[in-house]
Amino acid sequence: MAIKTTVITGATSGIGKETALSLVRQGHSLYLLVRNTHKGEELKAQLINETGNKDVHVIKCDLADLQTVRDAAAELSGRLFAINTLINNAGGIFAERALSKDGFELTFTVNHLGHFLLTNLLMPLLQKGQARIINVSSEAHKRGTPQFDDLQCEQSYNAWKAYGMNKLFNIYFTQSLASKFANKGILAFSLHPGVVNTHFWDDFRGLGKLMTTLIRPFMISAQQGAATTVFLATAPRLDKYNGAYFKKKKIAKTSAIATDTAARDKLWAISEKLCPLTP
């Protein structure tokens, strides 16, 4: 079996870490795109120690700093001939409004814009690898609406509304990739991992902290949360599901607004304007 070259963001904890472990066990050549390279190197050592697969690599990539995204894409382009799987796993929800290094609202940058730039910069390698692009979304998208007149949440900020909107954007992005690049051999999928018991929720205080504390006993493990991502990265014959949204390793329904083609196209145009794909 040919070695699969896989690139993943957000792998140093939670479902990303469990996804990385599963894929390394299955013999993938894995490139960890991480904000904190010290944690990345620790994870690399752990993965090699637990699996014996030494084909694990760490590259600096902070989605809240788009120059590091460009640098990571350039490094991968210099080191690889092709990429078979890109897993856009990193994400975040932030209790207070904050800005990225580039001056964009942080939820928008980390959950959508950074991955938009990364994926497009890697597209030549992805096309050579007839790749699958996997975007980790959430059922929270069903509470999201595309606020194109206030993408940066300058008029008002609510953490859950911002998160829901950007998880909706993950689905729009997936559908756009499937539409634009299917004839180049690209498959794109989005997914809901489940409500997972990780440090993802640690930024909340007050009522939000209370609510997460109450539901924590009902959350699934990070390993369970990684199952659908691993399935989409490894299962054969998924071509007919290109662009689809998955939950528990099966096709799932999105919100009605997630099928809005005009909104999907508008998001792509805005994203391309905010972070040009050419110098």
Image: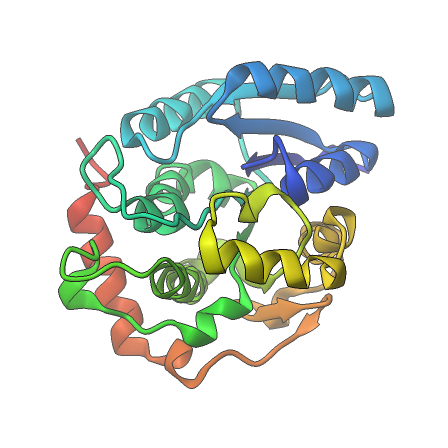
Left or right of 97? Residue 110 is: right
Quadrant of residue 15 within the rendered picture:
top right
Give above or below for 262 relative to 216. below
x and y, in percent, of residue 253 in the image: 57, 81
Quadrant of residue 30 within the rendered picture:
top right
Q: Is residue 138 visible?
A: yes
Colour mapping used in the image: rainbow
Left or right of 35? Residue 3 is: right
Q: Nearer the viewer, residue 139 or 123?
A: 139
Give above or below for 42 relative to 244. above
Residue occupying the point 52% across, 17% down: 37
Give above or below for 103 relative to 39. below
Left or right of 259? Residue 48 is: right
Q: Is residue 194 visible?
A: no
Residue furthest bottom in the image: 256
x and y, in percent, of residue 122 in the image: 42, 37
Q: Nearer the viewer, residue 241 or 34?
A: 34
x and y, in percent, of residue 71 in the image: 35, 22
Residue occupying the point 14% across, 66% down: 149
Q: Quadrant of the C terminus?
A: top left
Residue occupying the point 45% across, 69% down: 141
Q: Nearer the viewer, residue 60 or 142?
A: 142
Q: How many marks?
A: 0
Q: Quadrant of the N terminus?
A: top right
x and y, in percent, of residue 131 in the image: 56, 47
